[in-house]
Every structure is written in C-alpha cells, then in structure tokens.
Image (cartoon, helix red, strand yellow):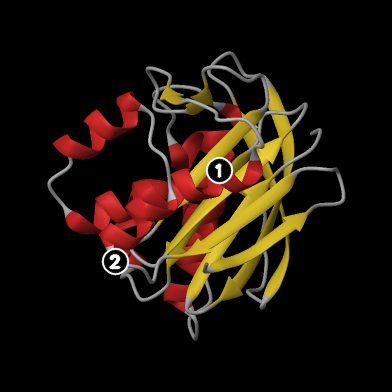
C-alpha cells in the first residue's frame, strides 16, 4: 500500500500523502466508496482523475476509524458530512494529499514541478512578488508561490479571491523545505497573517497551513 507518508504535525494536525501507483481496479479494491462518491466517480471520464479521487478515499479510510462521507461546499471546499473535523485535499496525477485538523480550518496543496507555471505569473502574483522571483530557478519559485497561495485560499475558504491582490507571499528563497510568511486581506480589509510550510519531493511541492493563525 503506497502511503507515501503519514505525519502528525507539531500542532496535532495530520498530513497524509498517497503515491498513486496502482491501477484503477487496484484502488477500487482498496477502498469502499459511499454511494454518492461512486456516482461522482461514474460521471468522471478521465481515468487519472478517477484514480486521484480513489486515492483521496484511501487516505480518508486511513485517517478515520469510522467511515466518513465527503462532500463539498458551494465554493468547492471539501468537508465531512458526518464529522466536525476539518480537512483539506489536493492531488496531482502522481500524488494525493489530505490534511486533517481537530480544531482549525486548514489548507493543503500539491503541485507537479514539471508543470510550466509561467501562465500563473500575472494571474496570481503582484508586481512586487514578480520582482522577487529567482532568475535561476524561476519555474520552481513560481511553483512554490502558486502552491502557497492555493493553500492560503483553501485555508481562508472565501469566494472570488483575487490571488494577486488579496494573497501576499513574503519574499523567500526556495529550499528543499521551509516556512513562508503570508498575508490574506479580505474584501472588508481584514488582514490575516499565516505561516505556509512547504517541502519539495519527487519533483513535486507540497504546501500546507495548519494550526492557529
């Protein structure tokens, strides 16, 4: 069973990552899908997307002793129908990630660093953030910026967010792992300061926000 890692973080949150190496049939045999998820899976045409959803279910089955039922708010944020524990989910064609917290809203994102992130530069970064980009490792730097902003977006759980204007990532130098200071400004000008953790592995970056702000 390719559970890539299962970590309990310093604040008690739990971060799990699944390496999606199985066939779709193998994943189906590893999990027991609730009827709603089975229906959603049947409507998903892309095989890779189906495997990603099955890998998320495999992680949920590991993280919770009792069967939990997954649904989504109108803004896309996942939640558990029968459990008050907070969750956040992300996946690529290679990995699925699940972040679980007993108390706080959380955010996790995982990105394939082989992707070309130049298309998100103007969409998601402010002029200052663009100036801070590394010329040598520009795509890596952009990937971490994008993933960090995705984690902030998921943590704050608001709609119609302007990534360039409302989510600020403080200047940082890309490393194998680290902590980035971030700030979210709501439309009513309320500011929330956050710490975004990140780690590079297997040509992917994972970012997460857990615990109290």
Residue 129, given in percent of the width and then of the height, sits at 53, 57
Query: Among all residues in the image, which is located at the extreme right?
Result: 10
The residue that appears at 37% across and 54% down in the rendered structure is 29
The residue that appears at 48% across and 25% down in the rendered structure is 69
Residue 174, given in percent of the width and then of the height, sits at 63, 74
Q: In which image quadrant can residue 188 be found? A: top right
Label 1 residue SS = helix
Q: Which residue is mark 2?
A: 23
| Foreground pick, 164 / 203 | 203
Within 10 Å of the Cα at label 1, are there few (<14), some (14-19), or many (20+) other Cα atoms? some
- Give the alpha-carbon distance from disc 1 to disc 2, as whole Å: 18 Å
Residue 12, given in percent of the width and then of the height, sits at 84, 43
* Total numbered labels placed on residues in the image: 2
Relative to 155, is 69 above or below? above
Q: Which residue is mark 1?
A: 61
| Foreground pick, 7 / 181 | 7
The residue that appears at 52% across and 58% down in the rendered structure is 145
| Foreground pick, 201 / 97 | 97
Q: Does the image show residue 209? A: yes
Residue 35, given in percent of the width and then of the height, sits at 32, 26
| Foreground pick, 125 / 103 | 103
Quadrant assignment for the C terminus:
top right
Q: Is residue 123 left or right of residue 15?
A: left
Q: Is residue 119 left or right of residue 59?
A: left
Label 2 residue SS = loop
Within 10 Å of the Cα at label 2, are there few (<14), some (14-19), or many (20+) other Cα atoms? few
Q: Is residue 91 left or right of residue 119?
A: right
Relative to 47, is 56 above or below? above
Q: In which image quadrant can residue 191 be found? A: top right
């Amino acid at each position: 069973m390719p559970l890539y890692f299962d970590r309990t973080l310093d604040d008690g949150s739990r971060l799990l990552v699944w390496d999606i190496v199985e066939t779709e049939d193998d994943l189906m045999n590893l999990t027991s899908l609730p009827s709603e998820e089975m229906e959603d899976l049947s409507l998903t045409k892309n095989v890779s997307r189906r495997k990603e959803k099955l890998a998320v279910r495999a992680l949920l089955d590991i993280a919770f002793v009792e069967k939990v039922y997954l649904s989504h708010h109108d803004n896309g944020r996942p939640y558990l129908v029968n459990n008050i524990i907070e969750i956040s989910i992300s996946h690529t064609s290679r990995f699925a990630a699940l972040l679980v917290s007993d108390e706080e809203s959380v955010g996790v994102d995982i990105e394939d660093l082989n992707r070309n992130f130049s298309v998100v530069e103007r969409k998601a970064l402010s002029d200052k953030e663009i100036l801070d980009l590394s010329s040598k490792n520009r795509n890596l730097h952009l990937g971490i910026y994008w993933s960090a902003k995705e984690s902030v977006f998921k943590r704050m759980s608001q709609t119609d967010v302007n990534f360039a204007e409302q989510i600020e990532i403080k200047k940082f130098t890309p490393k194998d792992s680290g902590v980035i200071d971030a700030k979210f400004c709501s439309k009513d000008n309320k500011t929330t300061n956050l710490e975004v953790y990140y780690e590079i592995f297997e040509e992917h970056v994972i970012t997460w926000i857990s615990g109290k702000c």
